[in-house]
Image (spheres, helix red, strand yellow):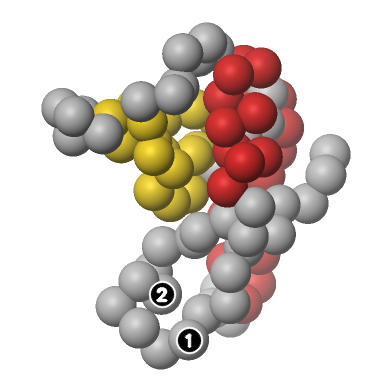
Amino acid sequence: MKKIEYLEKRGSVFDRLDIRKDPQKAFENAEKRTFRNLENYMYMYSKNYRDYFKHCDTRNYISCRQYNIFTTIYLKIRDKIEGIKFNGKK
């Protein structure tokens, strides 16, 4: 599993969104997993292990998993456990 690199948080209104450093990799991943015709879409952001794209004309959003389903489940469980540890809960 390759780690995805995101832009640094700089104190802007967009800090709550994760934006990939290399959006082309988001397109490559989406084409590999599900979508074949993404030429009319723009990469917007990533959230909860999904990449979100917006259609240039219709403004409709589509999303694609960043990892396979098993890796996504593992990462969500790991995040939940780390969140509990970080917040000081048992």
Q: Left or right of 21: which side holds 14?
A: left
Res. 34 image quadrant:
top right
Name, please, the residue furthest toward the right: 1
The image shows residue 68 at horizontal and vertical percentages of 68, 24
Mark 2: few/some/many CA within 10 Å (<14, 14-19, 20+): few
**What percent of the width, then of the height, locates residue 19?**
50, 59
Residue 52 % position (x, y)? 41, 39
Identify residue for label 1: 10
For the point 28% across and 30% down, the residue is 55
Residue 17, position in %: x, y? Answer: 41, 62
Q: Is 61 placed above or below 20 here?
A: above
Secondary structure under badge 2? loop
Contact? badges 2 and 1 (CB < 8 Å): yes
Q: Is residue 38 above or below residue 3?
A: above
Q: Nearer the viewer, residue 6 or 81?
A: 6
Q: Residue at x 50, y 38 (%)?
A: 50
Query: Is residue 38 rendered to the left or right of residue 79?
Result: left
Distance, label 2 to label 1, CA atoms, is 7 Å
**Three-letter code, disc 1:** Arg
Q: Which mark is residue 80?
A: none
Residue beneath label 2, please? 15
Residue depicted at 37% across the width and 31% down the height: 41
Q: Point out the tag, 2 or 1, that comes first from the N-terminus.
A: 1
Q: Give the quarter of the figure containing the N terminus.
A: top right
What residue do we see at 35% from left, 83% from top?
Answer: 12
Q: Quadrant of the C terminus?
A: bottom right
Report whether residue 50 is seen: yes
